Amino acid sequence: MATIMVPRIKLGSQGLEVSAQGLGCMGMTAYYGTPKPQPDMINLIHYALNSGITFLDTSDVYGPHTNEILLAKALGGGMREKVELATKFGIRSSISTPTKSSVQQSICGDPAYVRAACEASLKRLDVECIDLYYQHRIDKHIPIEVTMGELKKLVEEGKIKYVGLSEASASTIRRAHAVHPVTAVQLEWSLWSRDAEEEIIPTCRELGIGIVAYSPLGRGFLSSGPKIVENLSEVDRRKSHPRFQGENAEHNYKLYERINKVAAKKGCTPSQLALAWLHHQGKDVCPIPGTTKIENLNQNIGALSVNLIAEDMSELESIASAVKGDRQPPGVSTWKDSDTPPLSTWKAT
Ligand code: ATR
């Protein structure tokens, strides 16, 4: 068991309290190679909870559905009460395969869909209430006020406790927050993905919204560099990520080496350094590294005791500007296409 006491932080301004580091569960059943053995993943989740990592992150689209089903199994037998359970809606999958590489996806923020997705997640997760319910990707055809209006009703009905947005622009966050308080915004934030720092993060801070950093380890690149890239299986989605490909990857190995050097100087691992950099951004920031291994989970918890001084931070800050390759594959929706039409244009059908 990890010996570090995992601190608790307040996420947003509505009363949600979570472990200062969360656990991204996606890779346990989806996207990163074939699904991992269920008993091992349940064991890992229990280990995380007993170590103080209680903020679990999933989505209905991971699998699709298999990730929520795994969590339901892990949280049976009295574990539910120990957890802050976050799931997401909004990416609709047309077919279900174990690898998902050929699944057609569309984004939907229609109120009837939001309600149906929430009810389906409650059922799959086998819980009465979801602690934090995110819109996973923003539907740019539906005014954000309309989607938020339905989420507000779900809060009033006790089906969800808090509302979050993922990959939302500053203006979408602001409009959403005017309808119902947004408790957390989830975004990709790491040593090599810092585009949210310009506008999104200051907006969250101005509005008192918590920040949940996904892919804090650069999907494993910042942890293992060439080792991870060279060992990706054919069904691993990271094969389609520009930063993991060809010349970009070759170039980005140099960033990994730089991180490694600073880590050696600090007496920690590259993963711990990447996470510590995020933990040092403020008490309103919660990284949610994904792992399928107890050993790596323990290492990630260790990041909470890595102390970085201003000099270390600035040595690391220049890394993002040197990265090669877009952070997402072509066609994947991000905050850049998350602005929605004005409410005045909406005609409910
Ligand atoms: P995502 O949010 O997309 O899951 P991430 O958290 O940036 O991405 O990185 C997840 C990847 O980092 C996974 O491949 C994970 O591999 P394991 O499942 O084998 O752990 C890897 N990872 C997580 N923690 C790690 C650690 N401490 N050392 C090495 N690799 C680690």
Image (spheres, grey):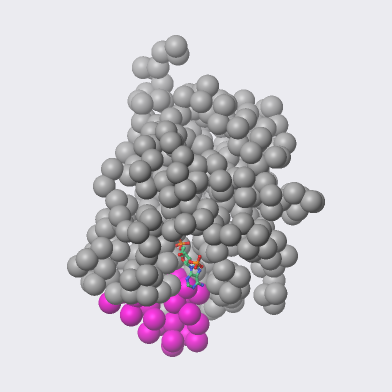
Q: Is 240 within the magenta?
A: no
Residue 21, quarter of picture: bottom right
Left or right of 154 in this view: 201: left
Question: Where's residue 201, x and y in %?
Answer: 43, 52
Quadrant location, the N terminus? bottom right
- Main secondary structure found in the magenta portion: helix
Q: Nearer the viewer, residue 208 or 215?
A: 215
Question: Where's residue 106, x and y in %?
Answer: 38, 33
Question: Where's residue 80, x and y in %?
Answer: 74, 49
Q: Nearer the viewer, residue 299 or 279?
A: 299
Left or right of 17 in this view: 209: left
Question: Where's residue 137, x and y in %?
Answer: 42, 39
Residue drawn 29% across the image and 51% down it:
329
Above or below, comparing residue 62 to residue 115 in the picture: below
Residue drawn 75% across the image and 49% down it:
76
Q: Nearer the viewer, residue 174 or 86?
A: 86
Q: Residue furthest left?
A: 247
Tell me if I can see residue 253 in this picture. Answer: yes
Quadrant location, the C terminus? top left
Q: Is 257 within the magenta?
A: yes
Residue drawn 51% across the image and 25% down it:
113
Above or below, comparing residue 257 to residue 72 in the picture: below
Tell me if I can see residue 174 in this picture. Answer: no
Residue drawn 41% across the image and 46% down it:
100
Above or below, comparing residue 229 to residue 76 in the picture: below
Q: How many marks?
A: 0
Above or below, comparing residue 144 to residue 12 in the picture: above
Q: Magenta residues? A: 254-274
Q: Residue furthest right?
A: 78
